[in-house]
Amino acid sequence: MKCNYACQSSTHLVARRQLLGGMTALGLGGAFGSLSALAHPASAAQLAKDQKRVLVIYMSGGLSQLESWDPKPKTDTGGPFRAIPTSVPGLHISELLPQTATLMDKLAVIRSINTRNNDHGVGSYQMTRGRNREPSTDYPHLGAIAAKALEAPSLSLPGHIRIPGGGRGGDSAYLGPRYSSIGVDGKPPQNSARPEAVSERGDQRRNTFRKQVNERSKLKRRSAETDIYTYSYEQAQELMKQREVFDITKEPQNYHDRYGSSGFGQHCLMARRLMENGVTCVQVSHSNYDTHNENFNFHLEQLGEFDQSFSALIGDLSDRGMMESTLVVVMSEFGRTPRINQYYGRDHWGKSWSICLGGGKVHPGAVIGKTSDNGTEVTDREVDHGDLFHTYLSAVGLDSTATFNIDGRELPLANPTGSTIDELLT
Amino acid sequence: MSRLYPAQEEPSEKQPDGSMPDPKLAHVREQWKYSSPLIACSFDPGGKYVFASAEDNSVQRWDLESSAITPFAAHDSWVRDMTFLADGQTLVTVGSDDQMIWWPVAAENPKPLKTIQAHKGWIRTVSISPDGTLLATGGNDNLVKIWNTTDGTCLHELAGHDSNVYSTLFHPEGQFLVSGDLSGQVRQWEISSGKFVRAFDASALHTYNGGQQVHYGGVRSIALSPDLKYMACSGLHKATNPLGAVSEPLVLLFDWESQELLRSHVTSDVRGIGWSVYYLADGTLMGLSGGGGGGFLLFWKPDEDKDFFKFKLPNIARDLALHPNGLQVATTHFDRHLRISHMTPKPPEKEDKKSG
């Protein structure tokens, strides 16, 4: 991955400190690309003040739309759960989400998704990249795009964090490893505390020496690889300085109670803490919804946990005035079959399913699209993953039809065949 | 699932009509197809009808003689279990709508006699006491409740389970009630005081799968042997893939007095869940397995871990009921059929009641 520094790209002039501090929309260039994506580039300063964020709640395995956002009680596919009214007149969701139901006036649902896919890997790629997987091209994750396009000048933490997880994710494609996600497991990142055996002064001297060697080395042998290597070191130093941002034990007990003691609850609390401290995109996963067997028992178990923590998170973001600047998306790789199988399960289903989202420019309380009486097909306003991706980007103020300039190549942020669901946005 | 004991003074190997059930003669003699997959089932104490709940929220009554079918429609969700009051004329159903409904068993156009909002969360089990004066229910609020059958008032709320209550059973001597939950705990309660007496450890019926992050299993059914020496708890084990329906049926056999785990009744080459267990009059334990391996009636002797006979049903099965005569069983199936299997010799003439 030798970069084309021989071309005298302006990247040579980008200081390492700038890399850490992030680049504004107008400051990007060369190997790290330039961004012509902001709908209003001149407002970068305003964005810095009012940074936009993306929070993905990923329901691993495939959440059932019939047990969540598009219930069909008293039909042949409805299952045993009933629908309950929400804070939005006329909008009903599953009785498994009683606390979320009281917050639907802050959220919206899209009930008409057809991704034409029933495979986990394909669905995950579709929903997080807004594209179908192609043999010759990899596309960046929504979090990588958000991390790059919404990066704030003051941000020194990673722009895209996965919870739970570990290590670097290879999910930034042509945006480069700088925007790859970092996984954390509900605690400050592993090895982010200075070892007791190393004194503070000793640590400083060690880093100073490393920097000196790096500076000398890069005069003759600088490459994209060495820059990323250096960047990783410096980002790690920032993580060490700010490791308390990841430490949810610093949160008051009443917040722990509110979010719940489950792993998911604690991860949601960490997500709020990270976003509040400037992280651009956080993805929290909740497992597991791949309920081919006993779908109803397992959704009862999983959504009971989800409902408390998710509603606490939305309420908290709202209380802190963060919803306007934070897009929240609850997504899966697909939905689940309307047909109930022989094990009281539901199987994979990409033909007519739902997501929930809110915040940013998303119109609170909106309901987009419709499915048939028993949920087996979309009957109004069909959308796919490409349309959803455009909508996510637009919801945080980006021009989803814009491009990244990567080494002179104009690469669209979103699949040009899709389009924003305009009526969903304010 | 509840176990309604046939009225008999002392356990006898022979049934009221003098016949003996022979598991090895099991065969499906009748089957009726409904328009929706079926869930739970039970015979009425008089042995004239069989009732089954369906995924369309209804309960259906079949007349065993005429095959006539009658709907019982009032629940707002799936009916999980059912039993009968002592007069044999009142059906009690419980469901995922949190409701307990009383019905006239033989009515031509049955309407609810009484509707009680009994739990907050699904009601998974209902049982009748031996003297017919009490009902016990258990559900997703982790509570067991004891009800007066005279007026439907709640006499006791028994708290202590830390997971959903899946099964209840009154001890035939009338002093105790047992209840089993998802985590595999079986709690024994004193009926008169509502006090907790002791717990049986059936946690082998529970799995927590860390990879999938799900709890799975539970005490799906409880039965006491005719001589009251043994308590059998059915469910599953070897749940290597709970979300993918990979498990095997398991019945734990406890000594009632000492609480010692005597047996782990297993089978071979059958994947599924032990949905239900009953004792036949001679002490043979009969279980229903339904799952990836299909539907099976399994039979065990109390002194052997492994089943001595299994009867394969035509489709995956979900519930089992023993007829008061002890000779035939009803099973509910995903393929929308209610099947009646007999454990007696096949009749010489071909039956013509089969449909679907």
Image (cartoon, coloured by chain):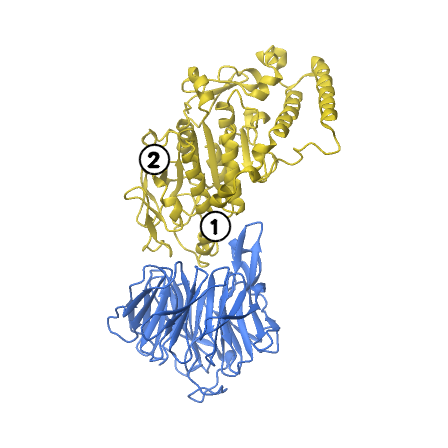
Which residue is denoted by mark 1 in the rendering?
A302
Amino acid type, callout 1: Gln
Question: Closer to the camera, B239 or A262?
Answer: A262
Colour seen for chain A: yellow
Percent x, y of residue B205: 56, 64
Colour seen for chain B: blue
Amino acid type, callout 2: Pro
Question: Local crowd at mark 1 within 10 Å, few (<14), some, or many (≥20)?
Answer: many
Give the left or right position of residue B208, taking residue B123 as reference: right
Percent x, y of residue B102: 31, 70
Give the left or right position of residue B154, taking residue B265 as reference: left
Q: Residue furthest left?
A: B109
Give the left or right position of residue A70, taking residue B9 as reference: left
Percent x, y of residue A383: 37, 36
Which residue is denoted by mark 2 in the rendering?
A364
Write down the chain letter for disc 2: A
